[in-house]
Amino acid sequence: MTHKIASREEWLTDRLKLLNEEKELTRRSDELARRRQELPWVRIEKQYRFQTDEGSASLADLFGGRSQLLVYHFMFGPDYTAGCPSCSSIADAFNGFVVHLANHDVTLSAVSRAPLAKLQAYKRRMGWTFPWASSSGNDFNFDFNVSLTEEQQREGAAYNYRREPAWTVGGIGDSMTKRGEEPVADMAAMSGTDVAAYTRERPGMSAFVFEDGVVYHTYSTFARGLDGLWGVYQWLDRAPKGRNESGVWWRRHDEYESPSQKGGSCCHAADA
């Protein structure tokens, strides 16, 4: 063991120092939330049509009768055979809190470019029930900089509020990850496509408000801006070993080996 070992009193001294920093971060986070809400609104002029479980829908229809809409730009391109594993890990939490948001005048919906039938099949596999709309055939993903055409990919395009260089396997794909630490090729393979097709889709979230019959765009964030929405990382950041990552360690929740396949737990061993 190489980690520092201390008495309870020594631990408490260090913990209280850290607590002050955590409180400052919380106050700073509250201030940033307030500033997000103060951003000006941008009127949505274009008419988008989405495919949903209920049929064809406008962007206003996605609000579901509420005044606020949060869209998770889920990476599931038309060439994918399965949703992005990272987006899937984030979306695993949606079922739990979508009902709470709905009862606070907020609709949460995922949006992807894959055809609706693909999204529906994947939802059934994952056991998800939250709204998920297909933007296949419209410009929604492109207008909000979470999808690229092949030409944009070759020439470079905007993502996360900056222009990226022309695509290379180690270039435009790296910008989707933490400084290229995760192998994009593995993620592409797990999504049933190649790196070029995989990186034409991007993760993000956007917020909209519906007021006096008009839809406005209020906020978007991308890449590491989604960390706070990825529930598993909020827990890992408080675990003794932190994120402790080496490559892509996560899987879709139905792809992990069960404890019995790994030889059982200590509890099972004690019962034997």
Image (spheres, rainbow, N blue to C red):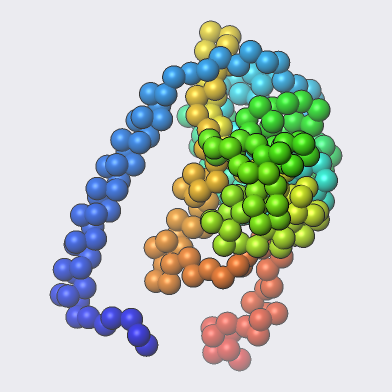
Count of numbered tags: 0
Toward the viewer: 106 or 182? 182
The percent position of residue 241, horizontal first and vertical second, equals 43, 72
The percent position of residue 165, horizontal first and vertical second, equals 63, 44
Is 37 placed left or right of 263 in the picture?
left
Q: Quadrant of residue 222?
A: top right
Q: Quadrant of residue 29?
A: top left
Toward the viewer: 222 or 124? 222
Is 162 placed left or right of 148 in the picture?
left
Q: Quadrant of the C terminus?
A: bottom right
The percent position of residue 158, horizontal first and vertical second, equals 61, 35
- Whether residue 96 appears in this view of the structure is no
Q: Residue at x 82, y 37 (%)?
A: 115
Q: Quadrant of the N terminus?
A: bottom left
The percent position of residue 257, horizontal first and vertical second, equals 69, 73
- Does residue 133 sit above or below 8 in this rendering? above
Q: Quadrant of residue 258?
A: bottom right
Is 196 placed left or right of 65 in the picture?
right
Q: Residue at x 23, y 57 (%)?
A: 19
- Whether residue 49 appears in this view of the structure is yes
Q: Residue at x 77, y 60 (%)?
A: 189
- Does residue 252 sit above or below 202 in this rendering? below
Toward the viewer: 198 or 74? 198
Q: Residue at x 40, y 26 (%)?
A: 37
